[in-house]
Amino acid sequence: MPFEGVDFYDMESSLSEEERAVRDTVRRFVDDEVMPVIAEHYIAGTFPTDLIPTMGELGLLGANLPEKYGCAGLNNVAYGLIMQELERGDSGIRSFASVQGALVMYPIHAFGSEDQRKRWLPGLATGELIGCFGLTEPDFGSNPGGMITTARETADGWVLNGAKMWITSGSMAHVAIVWAKTGGLDDPSSVRGFIVRTDTKGFTAKDQKGKLSLRASDTSELVLEDVHVPKDALLPNSAGLKSPLMCLTQARYGIAWGAVGAAMACYDEALSYAKNRIMFDKPIAATQLQQARLAEMLTEITKAQLVVLQLGRLKDRGTMTPQQVSLAKRNNVNVAAECAREARRLLGANGILVEYQSMRHMANIESVYTYEGTHDIHTLILGQAVTGLSAFGD
Ligand code: TGC
Ligand code: FAD
């Protein structure tokens, strides 16, 4: 059955015709092309690379970047709806699009030269080129300012040394945006971004095995050993830790929308299962306990939808703050985690099977809860925003 959406507060009436059309196109893509293959890939622990060309053709990669670089030039609500629908399919599919658009194409657009934009963005928009974003290191996750990857300037370019961990699309990428310190290791203001071709000597990517979450996604460790890159590998307008953190704001925005998609998928599955599962001679949907579950899920999904729609309107107006994004990422991913768990429980034993979606979403959301700023980190960002006091070191 095609997915019809969850829309208790008539969000539809707040969307423009273009926003609805984009949402419906991605919804069909997910129903027709993602859903039939995702369980198989999840079990195999592989990313469905066959879907990439279609994602490119549909304009889903870097969709809110300008048309002159081969992108769709959509507004941020349409971009968010794309993320919502992709994550309704699987967090791994949305992760791929988030990384490509918000963490690879956005920094090239925001901090790159015009030559770099023209050289890289069109191929990344079609999906002919795949990118990854290397910020996290084995010993520096929540505090990337401590990173120890370095970039030393030479007569004809730069030499990079270091290791990056947990890098989405790392093994399949043609190009990596690598963040490194160009000055003292205790100086986060010396962080700069580099466009590194992954076939450069000294660059290796190794698949991280053993994941029980986000299995339909490539997650890799990157090692850079005396990687020589030319001068034009540097993103000239990147300046300090603020630059990668600005990229994170873009990706977190998409995740806040994506989490709504995962929650909707679980609610939809739970509702349909509850109506059809007969126990004690009546559908379990007719019991107060299961209705309470469904009512709670519906309420939280509706609130999460309102949060991202308003956030998107603020972003389109140019007034959105990183702290507002933190609230949305923190809340909506938590809503998705709760909905996935409750849906799985409502499904009984069937809920542990891969042919149903809820447990796959439940496992995926554990990664989403951790990456792009853990739930705790966003709590501290909000705490700092309202008190003016930083509690990170405490
Ligand atoms: P702090 O001193 O607070 O900030 C340094 C400068 O940056 C500014 N800033 C931001 N700007 C834009 N967006 C944001 N989100 C920003 N956060 C901070 C800040 O105003 C300051 O500017 P200025 O002008 O004063 O220099 O830096 P800090 O070192 O104290 O760190 C703060 C903290 C802990 C919040 C930050 O490091 C953080 O967000 N940590 C979490 C790390 C994280 O989220 N990593 C994500 C890695 S990528 C990933 O997970 C991809 S998963 C993708 C997928 O598969 O979908
Ligand atoms: P840590 O920072 O070690 O945190 C461990 C625990 O301590 C957490 O519960 C955290 O909330 C808590 N904690 C940390 N600091 C504080 C504090 N001050 N006060 C209280 N509690 C605290 N990174 C990239 O750069 N690129 C990618 O493409 C990418 N993709 C990813 C894909 C997956 C599937 C995953 C799981 C991660 C990915 N990451 C990526 C890394 C991700 O961003 C980090 O895992 C995340 O930032 C947290 O870092 P950590 O895992 O080192 O946890």
Image (cartoon, rainbow, N blue to C red):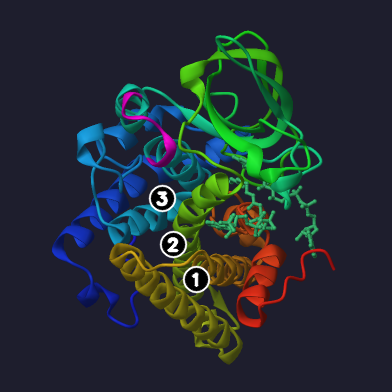
Provide the residue designation for mark 3. Answer: 86
Would you place residue 159 above or below residue 53 in this image?
above
Asked if one can make out residue 272 in the rendered structure from this viewpoint, the answer is yes
- Relative to the observer, which residue lies in front, 190 or 225? 190
- In the rendered image, which quarter is residue 214 located in? top right
In the rendered image, residue 120, in percent from the top left (x then y), is placed at 37, 25
Coordinates of residue 87 in the picture (x, y in percent):
46, 53
Q: Residues within 10 Å of mark 3 (few under 14, many from 20)?
A: many
**Element class at badge 3:** helix
User: Which three-letter amino acid code belongs to the residue tagged 1?
Assistant: Gln
Q: Earlier in the sequence, mark 3 or mark 2?
A: 3
- Mark 2 = which residue? 257
Image quarter of residue 350: bottom right
Residue highlighted by disc 1: 324
Q: Is residue 9 left or right of residue 333?
A: left
- Main SS of the magenta part reads helix
Mark earlier in primary sequence (3, 1)? 3
How packed is label 1: few (under 14 Cα within 10 Å), some, or many (20 or more)?
some
Residue stretch rendered in magenta on the structure: 110-115
Q: Earlier in the sequence, mark 2 or mark 1?
A: 2
Residue furthest to the bottom: 288
Q: Quadrant of the N terminus?
A: bottom left
Frontmost of labels 3 and 1 is 1
Of marks 2 and 1, the one in the foreground:
1
Q: Amino acid at mark 3?
A: Leu
Q: Amino acid at mark 2?
A: Trp
Camera-side residue: 32 or 382? 382
Image point 48% across, 83% down: which residue? 299
Total numbered circles: 3
